[in-house]
Structure formats: structure tokens, C-alpha cells
Image: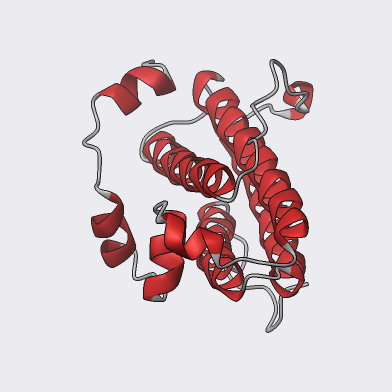
Amino acid sequence: MKSLIAVEANSVAVPRRAFFTRSGLLLSGAAVALLSGRDVLAAKSGKGTETDLRILNTALGAEFEAIAAYQVGAESGLLQRPMLDLAVTFQGHHKQHAELLSQTIMKLGGKPVTAKDRYIFPVDTLKDQTDVLRFAASLEKGAVSAYLGAIPLFGNRDLAKAAGSILGDEAMHWSVLRNAVGDAPVPEAFVS
């Protein structure tokens, strides 16, 4: 089985603008500019910057954890195509989230957190593809809840909008993974 890194090396990089267009994410011009590193908008953040930086770094840490979790899943030998390809795609999304969060933190004058050397995942409970997909779905659900909780806390509303777009992507991941294991893709009318 190819490692996830080898599969990633064979993929084509998608420019940030094309990613936002193809994924259907409609961010405000200000949010895209802020996330792409335009200093003028970063300087407008004003009060609340420290809180925003803490939120962004927490989100960045969670994205690094998701990247590592998908790596474990891909290298487990339990995922077969097309689920392996799906995991690689979702890991790529998390890498893009992490890159944008890191750049934004730096533009706001902060220092981005780095990935941990080691993450502890329940690998002993992952016996088959369904276990891996359910584990990934639980992480995606957690990400949805975390972004949902963070959005109203941002002082900079453009950051809140950008976090909302990431939340949407995480929700799609969660839904697709639930569907892949035969669960209702959207179990409830509201996310908490």
C-alpha cells in the first residue's frame, strides 16, 4: 500500500483561489485577503487580537491532530480504495486549513503552534475500515463543534467568517464519513 505521503506527492496542488471557488466556499473579500496574508486587513483587527490568536492557534493545533490522524488511518492498511483516496483528500483539506491558519497567525503578529511530535490515538481499537472511518468521523464532529463554539468569540468578524467556511468543510467531512459507514449522513437538524 502506498503511504499517504507518496499519494500526496502524486497529487496536483490547487491554488488557494481555485480551492475556495471549487469547494463552493464563498468568503468575503476581506476574509480571503486576511487569510491570504494581506497586512492591511490584519492591522485592522484591533482589540481582541490576543483572543483571536489563541482561538486560531487552538484551531491550528486541532488541524495538525487531524492531519496526523488521517496519516495513521492511511498507513494502517485498513482503508481500501476509494476510502483511502477519500482520507487522503480530507487530509489535504486539513493541510490547507493549517497553512492558512498559520499564515494568518503570523500576519496578526502571533507565533503559530507547531504539530506535536506524537499524538495518541486509539489505534488498538481500529480493527477494520469501518472503525477507522468512525474514528475519523468522531474527530470531524469534534472539529465542527469546536469551530461552532469559536465563531462568536472572534473579535475580528472576518476571521469568524473564515472559520465558518472551515466549519462547513469539516461538516461535509463528517457527513461523508457517516454516510460511508451506513449511518445517516445528517443525523440531526442542528449541530452542537
What is the quadrant of residue 51 in the picture?
Answer: bottom right
Residue 157 seen from this side: yes
Residue at the spot x=47%, y=47% of the render? Answer: 100
Residue 85 spot, x, y in % from top left: 37, 37
Residue at the spot x=41%, y=43% of the render? Answer: 86
Against 18, residue 67 (above or below) is: above
In the image, taking residue 6 as reference, residue 105 lies left or right, namely right
Residue at the spot x=49%, y=30% of the render? Answer: 79
Residue at the spot x=39%, y=62% of the render? Answer: 33
Residue 39 spot, x, y in % from top left: 44, 55
Residue 56 spot, x, y in % from top left: 66, 51
Residue 135 seen from this side: no
Residue 2 spot, x, y in % from top left: 36, 16
In the image, taking residue 124 as reference, residue 86 lies left or right, namely left
Quadrant into which the N terminus falls: top left
Against 90, residue 77 (above or below) is: above
In the image, taking residue 31 as reference, residue 153 lies left or right, namely right
